[in-house]
Amino acid sequence: MHISWRSVWAGSLFGLLTALGPWFQGISFQAAALFSAGLLLTYTSIGFLVAVLPTFQPKFLSGALWGALYSLPGAIFTAVPYPLTADAPAYYREFVGGGIRATLLTLIFGALAGGLAGLIRRPQT
């Protein structure tokens, strides 16, 4: 099996960029670290998925499709509201408030990560 490591790195880069967000939201160190690790690993795994699955042209669209499909379970999960304690930081409310906005953001970010990974994927030989 041929792995396009460029796609994995693209997913990791996208993951690093999104993982910065929790550090500026006034949540505890442990919460920021775990949230950031989850974001990093999610987008890195999208890059890996794009690296090993078959592609079609245009490569960006191919990667975006794989990224969106991979993100679909998470998007459905974020669509369902989940109760929080009254003192929970506002940052968490975005993700557990449910609704179409959280669902679309999850799908769009997954598609963007996959699209970037697909765009720079090396052609298979």
Image (tube, helix red, strand yellow):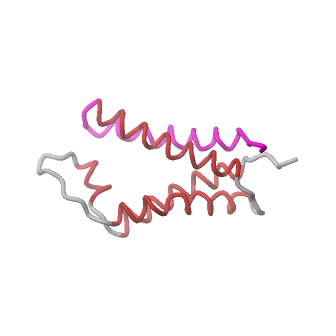
| Residue positioned most to the top | 29
Residue 75: horizontal and vertical position, in percent?
43, 62
- Front residue of 83/90: it is 83
| Residue positioned most to the front | 1
The answer to whether residue 117 is left or right of residue 15 is right
Was residue 122 drawn as part of the magenta stretch in this picture? no
- Write the residue at 25% across / 37% down: 26
Residue 73: horizontal and vertical position, in percent?
45, 61
Q: Is residue 31 above or below residue 107?
A: above
- Write the residue at 71% across / 40% down: 6
| Residue positioned most to the left | 86
> Which quadrant, please, contains the N terminus?
top right
Q: Is residue 17 above or below residue 97?
A: above
Splitting the image into 4 quarters, where does residue 66 fall?
bottom right
Residue 27: horizontal and vertical position, in percent?
25, 37
Q: Which range of residues does the magenta coloring cover?
A: 1-29
- Front residue of 99/70: it is 70
The answer to whether residue 123 is left or right of residue 37 is right
The answer to whether residue 79 is left or right of residue 67 is left
Secondary structure mostly seen in magenta is helix
Was residue 26 drawn as part of the magenta stretch in this picture? yes
- Write the residue at 29% across / 36% down: 31
Residue 117: horizontal and vertical position, in percent?
66, 49
Splitting the image into 4 quarters, where does residue 35 fall?
top left
| Residue positioned most to the right | 125
- Write the residue at 70% across / 54% down: 53
